[in-house]
Amino acid sequence: KQEVTQIPAALSVPEGENLVLNCSFTDSAIYNLQWFRQDPGKGLTSLLLIQSSQREQTSGRLNASLDKSSGRSTLYIAASQPGDSATYLCAAEGNTPLVFGKGTRLSVIA
Amino acid sequence: EPEVTQTPSHQVTQMGQEVILRCVPISNHLYFYWYRQILGQKVEFLVSFYNNEISEKSEIFDDQFSVERPDGSNFTLKIRSTKLEDSAMYFCASKDNLNTEAFFGQGTRLTVV
């Protein structure tokens, strides 16, 4: 059964700092790894999808990497801004639909 | 930009009542999903739907739950007799292909009292 873990559970950084969020999954037989952003009480906004044949994806200040063999993905956020404050979720999809981690709650302090 | 739309945004219901949560997936998508998130917990898969039938369901999706695509645009989740523990945020999602990006709606917050 797929299990997804995200470390750290919470992170507070000053504005402008670069940061890395970590995601690990137990079953490496995945098709996709998707990163989402969730604002308090709101829905899930898709940030990046990495397919199993890819190593990384970039969108603006975000870069996500995938290492299937080690069961890890990272989300790199460059030059963080207060507007980046949210919970970031990763989710792995393989033989079962998306399995989510509990998320990393990010606070960017101005 | 196309988006998944869910209604209502918030529903309060009495225990034992039936509720129907509604979703309009992105128009050319073929795969539809319901997930839920109990406050403070992980987002959990409930059910997937493809080609007018359930393709997969979780242990949570028991006989109290049902899904339907009554027309070409709507996708509904029905809870037949709500319990207190059904209180959660329910998310609908859709995809155009199995290996592509899933798009989620803004959710329906269900409160059972």
Image: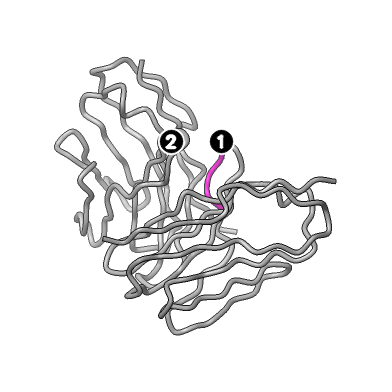
The residue that appears at 73% across and 67% down in the rendered structure is: A61
Residue assigned mark 2: B89
Looking at the picture, tell me which residue is in the foreground, A23 or B100. Answer: A23
Looking at the picture, tell me which residue is in the foreground, A1 or B61. Answer: A1
Residue A13 is tagged as none
Q: Chain of mark 1?
A: A
Viewed as shown, does residue A110 lie left or right of A86?
Answer: right
Q: x, y percentage for residue A68?
A: 42, 78
In the rendered view, tell whether residue B37 sits above or below residue A22: above
Q: Is residue A42 magenta?
A: yes
Q: Are marks 2 and 1 in contact (CB under 8 Å)?
A: yes
The CA distance from mark 2 to mark 1 is 9 Å
The amino acid type of the residue labelled 1 equals Gly
The residue that appears at 76% across and 51% down in the rendered structure is: A13
Residue assigned mark 1: A41
In the rendered view, tell whether residue A4 sits above or below residue B12: below
Q: Main secondary structure of the magenta part?
A: loop
Q: Which residues are magenta?
A: A41-45
Q: x, y percentage for residue A19?
A: 70, 62
Looking at the picture, tell me which residue is in the foreground, B74 or A60. Answer: A60
Q: Find numbered disc 2 in the image and state the secondary structure of the residue it sits on.
A: strand
